[in-house]
Amino acid sequence: MPIPNDPMILLSYINTQLRDFYPSLEEFGKTNNIDIKIIKEKLSGIGYEYNSSMNRFVWIYCAADLAVFWLVRVSFS
């Protein structure tokens, strides 16, 4: 099965596959003959990176992201 092109759908797909079937991203890539560097590049483009201890892609945020989040949240309260 080809992997999704849309980064958000790819994120959901990969994390579900890792949770349900694979002990690591490397094992997922090897089993499905997929270059995991491509997956990492696509998902880093939307702010996610692979966390091997959690075996999932997680959002990498910075102080600027949090500041924007709180400004938006406060302005809509």
Image (cartoon, rainbow, N blue to C red):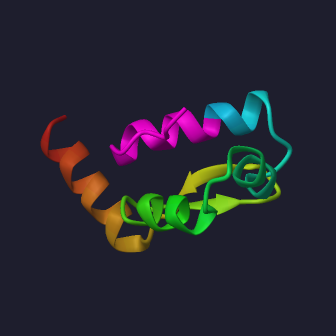
Nearest the viewer among 25 and 66 is 25
Quadrant including the C terminus = top left
**In this rendering, is residue 13 above or below 7?**
above
Q: Residue furthest left?
A: 75
- Does residue 11 appear to the left or right of 29 in the view shown? left
Residue at point 41%, 36% (across, down): 9
- The image quadrant of residue 50 is bottom right
Number of callouts: 0
Confirm whether the magenta stretch covers residue 35. Answer: no
Q: Position of residue 15 (x, y in %)?
A: 62, 39
- Does residue 35 appear to the left or right of 62 in the view shown? right
- Does residue 40 appear to the left or right of 19 in the view shown? left
Residue at point 76%, 54% (across, down): 30
In magenta, the rendered stretch is 1-15
Residue at point 14%, 37% (across, down): 76
Confirm whether the magenta stretch covers residue 8. Answer: yes
Q: Position of residue 12 (x, y in %)?
A: 51, 35
- Does residue 41 appear to the left or right of 53 in the view shown? left
Nearest the viewer among 31 and 18 is 31
